[in-house]
Image (cartoon, rainbow, N blue to C red):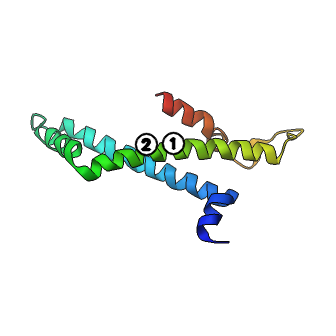
Amino acid sequence: MGALTFLLKSSIGKKIIMGLTGLFLIIFLVVHCTVNSLIFMNDGGVLFNEVAEFMGTNVLIRTMEIVLFLGIILHIIQGLYLVFENRKARSVGYTVPNGSASSKWYSRSMGLLGTLLMIF
C-alpha cells in the first residue's frame, strides 16, 4: 500500500490528515493573533498598518488564504466522515458507556467544540 493510498483510505491515515489540517489551522490562529496584537504597540498603529499592508498585498499570503479555506473545508469533511465511519463500525452502542475511563471529555466532544468554534 502506497503512502498516499494509506493516507486516503485507512482510518489511521484519515486521522493523520485530521491532525495535520488541525495543526495548520492552529498555526494560522497563532499568526493571526500575533499580527492583531501588534495594534497594542505604542507606535500609533504604524507597525500594525505596515504588517496589514504586507499581508494584504503579498501574493504568497493571498494564495495561503485559498489554502486556508481548503484546509478548513478538508478538516470539516474529514471529521464528519470519520465520525460517521466510526459509528458505522459499531452500530450497537455499549450497554454501559464509560467514556471517562479511557479518554477525556474534550477528546470525545471535538465535534461539538469545533462547531462552537466555527460559529464563533
Dot 2 lies on which element? Answer: helix
In this rendering, the answer to whether 104 lies above or below 11 is: above
Total marks in image: 2
- Residue at image position (40%, 50%) is 27
- Judge whether residue 104 can be spotted in this image: no
Q: Give the Cα distance between marks 1 and 2.
A: 6 Å
In the image, is 68 to the left or to the right of 58?
right
In the image, is 12 to the left or to the right of 99?
left
Indicate the position of residue 15 as horizontal and vertical percent values.
Answer: 62, 55
In the image, is 48 to the left or to the right of 37?
left
Indicate the position of residue 44 as horizontal and vertical percent values.
Answer: 9, 34
- Residue at image position (17%, 41%) is 53
Circle on res. 62: none
Amino acid carrying label 2: it is Phe
Residue extending farthest bottom: 1
Question: Contact (CB < 8 A) between labels 1 and 2?
Answer: yes
In this rendering, the answer to whether 116 lies above or below 21 is: above
Indicate the position of residue 112 as horizontal and vertical percent values.
Answer: 61, 33
Indicate the position of residue 87 as horizontal and vertical percent values.
Answer: 77, 42
The residue tagged 1 is 73
Circle on res. 69: 2
Dot 2: few (<14), some (14–19), or many (≥20) neighbours within 10 Å? few
- Judge whether residue 11 can be spotted in this image: yes
